[in-house]
Amino acid sequence: MKCSSLFFLVLAGCLVVPMSASTVSAQDSAVLDTPADAAKLPGAREVFQKHLSALGDADEIAAVKSVKMTGKISMPAMNLNGTLEIIQVKPNKIATVMDLPQVGKQTQVFDGEMGWMGSDLMGMQKMPKEQIEQMKAQMAIETMEGFRETFKKVRITGKQEYDGKDSYVMKAVTKTDSEMTMFFDVETGLMRGMKSVQATPMGDIPVQLYMRDYKVTGPMKSARTTVVKAGPTELVMTVEEVEVDGDIPEETFKRPADL
């Protein structure tokens, strides 16, 4: 189904959790040094530091080696419901399995260098370069190191209501010239969501994320509900269990022999 293929192009970065949150230092000014404007907005460094601090203790988070999340996934308009599993391994590996009975099991994996996606029925194919770059950018939002390596320009452009919360608007441009808009809760500092345009085999698709229901597991806080809107279609992902530093099957990131 085209809908499942589309959402796997944006799925991997949607539920990432902080794996190495860190403190913003003076060395980060090349990326995040944004002076407050006439409206007395905070700088990007201040906003991003508040987000990192809200996620948990930086040293404790940095000690985490892997996270496994399991839960439910649904497409309400199509009455489709299934299961979701996401495994992250430090520093930048992520594997996602979505199983919808009406569609079948779909897999997407990035091993830090190469990505692949597909199903048992249709086989696996290499992930497009554009999608890999977008995934890296989405994973980079939880670490200062990733932020500095991924984005060449970041600034706070205003304040507005986003998903019912008063939020700062952060505009970011990656080093590959992709643009992303992120929204940070003024009160808590937590990211409420983002807007971007995702490259897909069907063309560029505007995508909007809503991140809700933050909860703490172990040393870190993460969103338990993520809503993805791509065009007229909506996908809802709900994390029910989070396992920190558990056993990760060896085959999780094993590359298919035919790629």
Image (cartoon, helix red, strand yellow):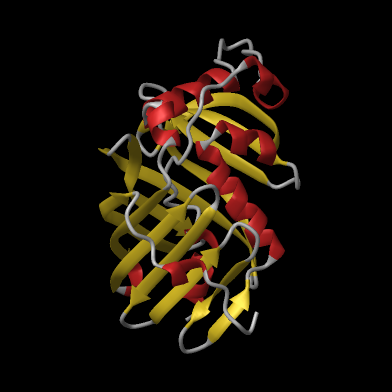
Q: Residue at x 45, y 41 (%)?
A: 19
Quarter holding residue 247: bottom left
Residue lying furthest bottom in this view?
A: 121
Query: Is any atom of residue 249 visible in this view?
Result: yes
**Which of the 4 image quadrants contains residue 257?**
bottom right
Where does the image place residue 219, in percent across and percent down from the top left? 32, 34
Answer above or below: position of 98 versus 168: below
Q: Decide if residue 239 is on the left or right side of residue 128.
A: left
Instruction: Pinpoint residue 250: horizontal percent, then vertical percent.
Output: 44, 68
Q: Is residue 235 visible?
A: no
Q: In this orientation, which residue lies closer to the viewer: 199 or 88?
A: 88
Q: Is residue 218 above or below residue 58?
A: below
Which residue is located at x 57 percent, y 61 percent?
A: 111
Q: Quadrant of residue 50?
A: top left
79 in relation to 87, above or below: below
Residue positioned 35% across, 75% down in the render:
99
Foreground: 159 or 43? Answer: 43
Q: Residue 233 in the image: x percent, y percent?
A: 44, 65
Q: Which residue is drawn at the image coordinates 55% and 47% (left, top)? A: 138
